[in-house]
Image (cartoon, coloured by chain):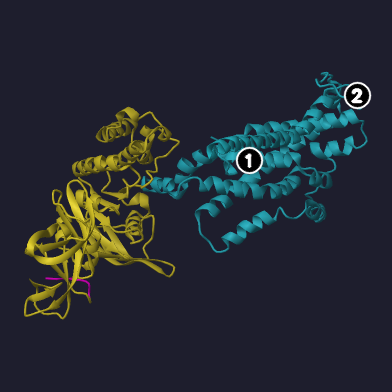
Chain colours: A cyan, B yellow
Amino acid sequence: MSDATADAVAPDTRATGRYLYIASVVFLCAWVIVPIYFLLINTLSSPETVNSFPKPFWPEFDLGSLTFFAGFAGMLTALKNSVIVAAMTMVMSILIGAPAGYALSRFEFPGKGLFRLLILLTRAFPLPLLALPLAVMFIQTGLDDTAFGLALVHTTLAIPFAVLITFSLFSGIPMELEEAAWTLGCTRLTAFTKVVLPLILPGITASAIFAFVISWNEVFAAAVLTIENRTLTAFLLQNLDTSPLHLKFAGGFILVVPALIFIFAVRKYLFAMWGIANR
Amino acid sequence: MAQIEIKNVAKSFGAYQALHDINLTIEDQEFMVLLGASGCGKSTLLRIIAGLETATTGKVWIGGRRIDNLSPKDRGISMVFQNYAVFPHLTVFENIGFGLRMQKLPNDEVTRRVERTAGLMHIEQLLKRYSGELSGGQRQRVAVARALAMEPDVILMDEPLSNLDALLRMEMRAELKGVLAESKTTAIYVTHDQVEAMSMADRISVMHEGKIVQAASPIEVYRNPSAEFVAGFIGNPPMNFLPANPAESGKWQVAGQVIDGPGASAQLKFAIRPEDLRLADDGFKAVAKVIEPLGAHLLVTCEVDGQLFRAVLDSDFKVKPGEVLNLTPQPDRVRWFDPQTTLAVA
């Protein structure tokens, strides 16, 4: 008797839990995918379809909006600026962030906990708070409206991630590997280049690309600190404000896609460094 | 020639004193085991010799050369780690040849030495594999081969077998002993496993609370422990202790028995190994508490005079809990300790 009740109840709760689980997964996926889907549909639609309702499920593959952007004056320069700034951000945040991550992972020093906290705290202040005084300072020093100046700001934004990601990368390399290298004839430096570096290189690449994406997506500082040398985000923000709807969609699409592709390419490492098992 | 001399080495981590004034000489080609419970300082001592840790005070010589101020790579040592530390991004071949490549040896010399040591450790067929494709035992073989390929003066091993399962450990233990004897290097081997220590060592240094309590051959450490700690640490089960009161000169009153012992001293501790007890008509009255048939013999935990007392008896012997046994010690195996100094009394 008691067996029968247990049999009846147990699968039931399990099934409910399962439906709930599936529903949550579907909801979360839709949360991310639906906006991107509409972006895609509207980008590949003619201006008339963009403004009509309901939408077709399949895009029309009208490349009118995208061709418009390809021929738009200043577009390529802005794209080039974006790439330059993002590349500089990538290099600087790794060059500064990785040694900090190594120090955090390998050495005990006073104030270590506070240092980690402060790194996180830099993300607690809204960018406008930072950008306006910076704009004034940049104008005084002549750094305003330069790729390097903007890259400096973006590096500031990317460094907390670079430090914490490389910290967890280095922590994942057992100290014994380095010690073994020392006993086998390495100095601290050669042990690093011959043993640690090859092991973390994929992770470093991933965190570099992450920094790249942070810079690529950043719009506020870019809009405030550049005028002539606008990056793509700032350029589109400025020009799309008064554009028709279908061009706004196409502009958004151009911005989102490269970031998506980059993140997709390094997803394995991002999962790994955020402590989620990926195997 | 690689004699190791350790003089007055001490190490403290902040307020914690991990090693107190260690003095030890390890002969050329000797197999020295540092044995102790975790936290006794044995690994710290090994790491100081390796140069991975800096001694607070003291000096270390290897082969007459003072090395405590040199970096690990200049000490003529190589080391085997507990977690193997096989480089995951290199093949087995490149792992074994890593140190040789660092010395910029010509390619054919590297190949020759890698193949020789791989043969010694029976891993020739694994040379092209990566560490991720190896079992724990195979990784350990790679780690040892890598250390041997350096042809070091001294090989240091930090609990190299403790991550292996029991059967493999026994197999590797014998093999390692053979390989190291053949390679004629001086070896220092850290372990908390006394069976490993007994079976491999030329000499065992028993460590406790940052000090070397006794450094002697395995059988000496077992038969004639220099201190109560060693007697209670070595042997499974360890020695039995009973308080002894002086009777007439050279005789001691132990749990209702009169036993011949050393002269002088006000109070002593009587000690006997469980396997050195015999059943007799007369002897300690021992109340059997727990009986454990272990196959080869019978381990009986009893109570003598209110004290815990273990005896190892023949496995055919029948006994039930609560029965009273008469146990008599083999006279030449009895040891005595001074309860004040905890040292052995002859």
Mark toward the viewer: 2 or 1: 2
Confirm whether the magenta stretch covers residue B227.
no
Q: Which residues are magenta?
A: B341-346
Q: Is residue B343 left or right of residue B166?
A: left
Identified by mark 2, the residue type is Pro
| Outermost residue to the front | A1
Confirm whether the magenta stretch covers residue B344.
yes
Read off the residue under disc 2.
Answer: A47
Task: Inspect this view and state whether residue A189 appears.
Answer: yes
Label 1: which secondary element: helix
C-alpha span from label 2 to label 1: 38 Å
Chain of the residue on which disc 1 is drawn:
A
Mark 2 or mark 1: name the one nearer the start of the chain: 2
Chain of the residue on which disc 2 is drawn:
A
Q: Is residue B206 left or right of residue A151?
A: left
Tag shown at residue B112? none
Task: Inspect this view and state whether residue B63 appears.
Answer: no
Main SS class of the magenta portion in the image: loop
Q: Position of residue B111 (x, y in %)?
A: 32, 31
Q: Position of residue B57 (x, y in %)?
A: 35, 67
Read off the residue under disc 1.
Answer: A208
Label 2: which secondary element: helix
At 36% from the left edge and 63% from the top edge, which residue is drawn? B55
The residue carrying pointer 1 sits among few (fewer than 14), some (14 to 19) or many (20 or more) residues within 10 Å by Cα, namely many
Quadrant showing the N terminus of chain A: top right
Identified by mark 1, the residue type is Ala
Q: Position of residue B134 (x, y in %)?
A: 38, 34
* Image height of B265 relative to A249, above or below: below
User: Which of the 4 image quadrants contains residue A80?
Assistant: top right
A182 vs A3, nearest the viewer: A3
Q: Is residue B333 left or right of residue A162?
A: left
Q: Is residue B229 left or right of residue B95?
A: left
